[in-house]
Image: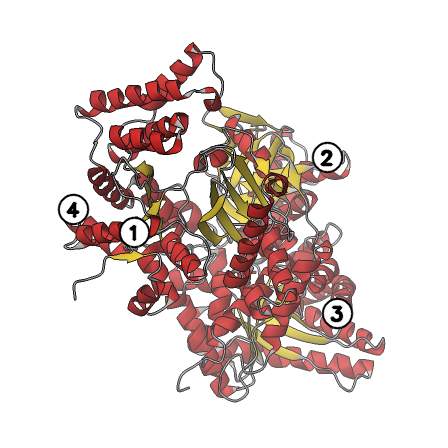
Amino acid sequence: MAKKWVYLFDEAAEAESYAGSWDGVRALLGGKGAGLADMTRAGVPVPPGFTVTTEACNQFSASGKFPEGMWAQELAALQEVEKRTGKKFGDPANPLLVSCRSGAKFSMPGMMDTVLNISLTDKTAEGMIELTGNPRFVYDSYRRLIEMFGTVVLGIADEAFEEPLKEYKEKNGYKLDTEMTAEDWKAMVETFKAVVKKEKGFDFPQDPLKQLELATEAVFKSWNGKRAIDYRRATNIPDDLGTAVNIVTMVFGNMGDDSGTGVAFTRNPSTGDKKMMGDYLLNAQGEDVVAGIRNANPIENMVKKMPEVYYQFMDITDKLEQHYKEMQDVEFTIERGKLWMLQTRNGKRTAKAAVKIAVDMVNEGLISKEEAVLRVTPDNVDTLLHPQFDEKAKKAAEKAGAFFARGVNASPGAAVGQAYFDANTAEKMAKEKKQAVIMVRPFTKPDDVHGMIASKGVLTSEGGATSHAAVVARQFGIPCVVGASSITIDLEKRVMEVNGKAVKEGEWISVDGTTGEVFIGQIKTIEPKIEEQSELLTILNWADEICARDGMRNAPPKWPTRGLQVWANADYPKDARRARSYGAVGIGLCRTEHMFFETERLPIVQRMILAKTSEERTEALNELLPYQRKDFDGLFEAMEGYPVIIRLIDPPLHEFMPDEEKLFEEVVTLRVKGETEGLKEKEDLLTAIRSMHESNPMMGLRGVRLSIAMPEIVEMQVRAIFEAAADCTLRKIVVRPEVMIPLTGTVKELEWIQPRLVRIAAAVLKEKGIKKLDYKFGTMIEIPRAAVTAAEIAKLAEFFSFGTNDLTQMTFGYSRDDAERNFLVTYVEQKILPKNPFQTLDRDGVGKLMEWAITEGRKTRPELEVGICGEHGGDPESIEWCHIIGNNYVSCSPFRVPIARLAAAHVALKYSGKAIVEDK
Ligand code: PEP
Ligand code: MG
């Protein structure tokens, strides 16, 4: 049998048997064609018609001509449509008019072409006038055809038609198209025909079949038009899908006051409320509603004008929702009192509506909880939790030329504030002057954190997604854009500039951490709160329920078989409380060094670092101990009953010291002025800092290496942890401390340090009279060697936590502080890397190391607890990988916890019951 290129709307069954599934039908007939066929099958009134397949389009794209047999099938289908409508194509006595509409598998609104009113010619127009007695309608339809055909099929510029129409209306004093009379449209038909002749050198085709053939071809070609290609790039729609062509009998909403046309959503697409929302116009054609040429009426008004049609419409749309189990976006036309449905598709909606509709549909018994959870995207959750710019206000700002720069979207949300160029000023303006502040820096360092915390937003011109600014901003939920490299910041003159546009210190800017954009001035924001979003909480609870089911993963004994848990990275009790309220069930990383930077502690820390003897050092540490104990006590109390992983000191010590350059300047100034007071201390300090200098501090004396060089620090920390744990236990608070040793590269390091620390833990518990405490000692896996030798490491480590920031840095050999600024953007653009590996885990390299580490680690210790605490812990794609390889949990910033809960449920459902590891 010859290949079938054309399917009538009532051939859904044939299409399904050829394509093998409904998804296959959507690929074959496009979303619109499949929808029309499906509606026809459901008994919904759809104007008769047929679909030319996407396969035909692909053949056309490859060969430049229609595939063999396609045109004959199109003509045969046209004859069927003639039979069903009782009209004839090109017959002036009873003409059949059709539209030719594009429609790919995935909706690409407005990106491809459509031609309406095909088969109108001078002759059929006369026939139509006879038939309808409505010359105005006929000439209006005819000029629309010439215009659409001229622009879409013949490639004439829109203005060639728009200009003469505008001039004509002005000349006659008309404002609206509705003021045009039959004679006026008739004149425009002649004008438009002349435009075609002038532009193309031939006449507008008077052969209806030629019109159909050329329109079909034009729709095929529009698949490879620039607009469509750009849209596909932006939305990741594959290029090889092709578009179908739908030939649909024209029904007219502009045949008088018993006709009309409209568009509607079956629920409110912006709030999700279960109330039809739409507009209609009497005596109008489709695009009049969409284009807003005339003010449309709310759909509910239709009940008064056409009660029967209205109730039929409500009934049909209700059935469509029941059928698709989704909110529908429909187009309809009423021709002389008869309702026709032209299109139905799942309606686009805001994040708020997506969540509400999903929950409502479960309550209505339409869908399952699992389906509801799957329908909400991690991006939806993200949007609902961060302040956002009001879209209209943002567009207006853009239009007004307020756009300033673009960088990496490091921490989502919208922030508006006055720009200050250093942490102290930012903090001062925020605290003392109560200003909304955006801290702007080339990059940030640990001693800038106080300024960041005081700010509404952070902007840097250097650094990437795991730069200090990005990590800290995400941790505290501060909207942040980093690496906006077009900005030059002049810290002397206190001004920043992009191409001559300048923002002085104290001026207002708006920073969009969700998109990476920066604007001059203040843009209106909308602030959401999680506890007020009951539907979102419902979805997240369902997500947790799904993840908690045993058997979501199929794995060897003692491996986790439930879905992932979500823990949080939090340093302070208030962050821990937030993390808990957002649903975290553990702390996966407390970076203890952040506490060392607090104003009253830093001098003690510096004294400790500069100590010449172990006694001096111990003395300073003894001063720090009560502070740390209090920190941990607060954290344990906030996380009562849940595990809390405390990481021992990690960064190189010079980070706690004053800036070398600044200190040098001070010394030089004192010397030049001949002042001696304080000079010696500063000189000594400078010498000490210089002696600590390392060419590559990230790979230098930090992490466990530092603990081995200076064990007193971590000994103090472990004492503080266990004293706090003991105190909490005595207060009947259940605590589960887990001590984490960072940056291990060989098990020998653990063998050196861990027993000392375990002894301290045991001693403290004995001192305090605590008999039983649930605690663990473990390590971070953030050096490739640790991953490779995981079986050895697990002999000591009772848990692993993947520090994927460092693990990515060290696996690729890319500096996490510089790579994004220097070459990563180019790498992603040039497709050398699929994505920024500091944002989304590189499964093939870093991910493989993780997989190996888990498998090897659990060979030694099957019950080994495994988590991730690098920035990837809050990224849905990376979370998926963690589920696949058998992590127990992911840990991320408190603000990302809800997103991670949803993502964890998505992956649990996607892989439900599948084996974590084959043959292991
Ligand atoms: C990591 O390396 O992934 C990590 C969590 O540690 P840090 O970012 O503090 O180096
Ligand atoms: Mg690290």
Comparing marks 4 and 3, which lies closer to the viewer? 4
Q: Is residue 445 left or right of residue 456?
A: left
Q: Which amino acid does the dot numbered 1 rest on?
A: Lys
Query: Which residue, given by chain and number where applicable, does mark 3 sit on?
Result: 636
Q: Nearer the viewer, mark 2 or mark 1?
A: 1
Q: Secondary structure at mark 1?
A: helix
**Front residue of this view, candidates 831 and 898:** 898
Cα distance in 3D space between marks 2 and 3: 34 Å
Measure how far apart labels 1 and 3 are at the Cα level: 78 Å
Q: Earlier in the sequence, mark 4 or mark 3?
A: 4
Disc nearer the start of the sequence (2/1): 1
Q: Find the distance from the CA under tag 4 to the CA under tag 2.
A: 64 Å
Question: Which of the two labelled residues, at mark 4 and mark 2, occupies the earlier sequence position?
Answer: 4
Tell me which residue sits at (35%, 26%) in the image.
139
Q: Residues within 10 Å of mark 2 (few under 14, many from 20)?
A: some
- The residue carrying mark 4 is 64
* Disc 4, SS: loop
Callout 4 amino acid: Gly
Tell me the residue that label 2 is attached to.
435
Q: Which residue is mark 1?
A: 83
